[in-house]
């Protein structure tokens, strides 16, 4: 066995948060803010879509809008070659 494969400091792995990209950090911060915003808005509200009007807690409306936004973003995402 030789020591050619050993690199000084190779056994010191970085913690998982040091491996996050700026884009991932921003996504996590926005997700946390969205959850806080949704949790703080619990009053009833009327929601209309086309010809249907329903009364729902605002947090359900916000959660649905968030899920729809995530789905649209995921479907519209284009990977650069």
Image (spheres, grey):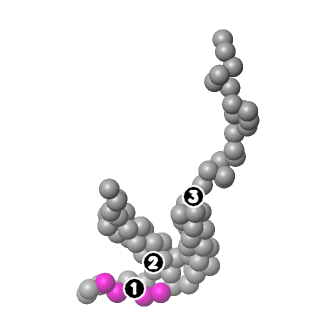
Number of on-image labels: 3
Of callouts 3 and 1, the N-terminal one: 3
Residue sitting nearer the eye, 10 or 76: 10
Magenta segment range?
45-49
Q: Tell me what residue is drawn at x 67 percent, y 15 percent.
A: 2
Q: Is residue 41 visible?
A: yes
Q: Is residue 28 visible?
A: no
- In the rendered image, residue 48, in percent from the top left (x then y), is placed at 34, 87
Overall secondary structure of the magenta section = strand
Q: Which residue is mark 2?
A: 61
Q: Tell me what residue is drawn at x 34 percent, y 69 percent.
A: 72
Q: Look at discs 2 and 3 and give the one toward the viewer.
A: 3
Q: Is residue 17 above or below residue 73?
A: above
- Residue 53 left/right relative to 67: left
- Residue 78 left/right relative to 17: left
Quarter of the rendering containing residue 53? bottom left
Rendered image: mark on residue 21:
3
Quarter of the rendering containing residue 66? bottom left
Residue sitting nearer the eye, 61 or 4: 4
Rendered image: mark on residue 47:
1
Q: Is residue 5 above or below residue 75?
A: above
Q: Residue furthest left?
A: 51
- In the rendered image, residue 7, in percent from the top left (x then y), is placed at 69, 31
For the residues labelled 2 and 1, the Cα–Cα distance comes to 8 Å
């Amino acid at each position: 066995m030789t020591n050619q494969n050993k690199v000084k400091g190779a056994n010191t792995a970085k913690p998982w948060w040091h491996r996050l990209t700026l884009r991932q950090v921003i996504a996590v911060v926005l997700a946390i803010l969205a959850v806080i915003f949704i949790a703080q808005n619990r009053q009833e509200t009327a929601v209309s879509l086309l010809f249907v009007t329903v009364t729902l807690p605002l947090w359900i409306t916000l959660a649905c809008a968030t899920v729809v936004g995530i789905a649209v973003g995921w479907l519209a995402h284009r990977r650069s070659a």
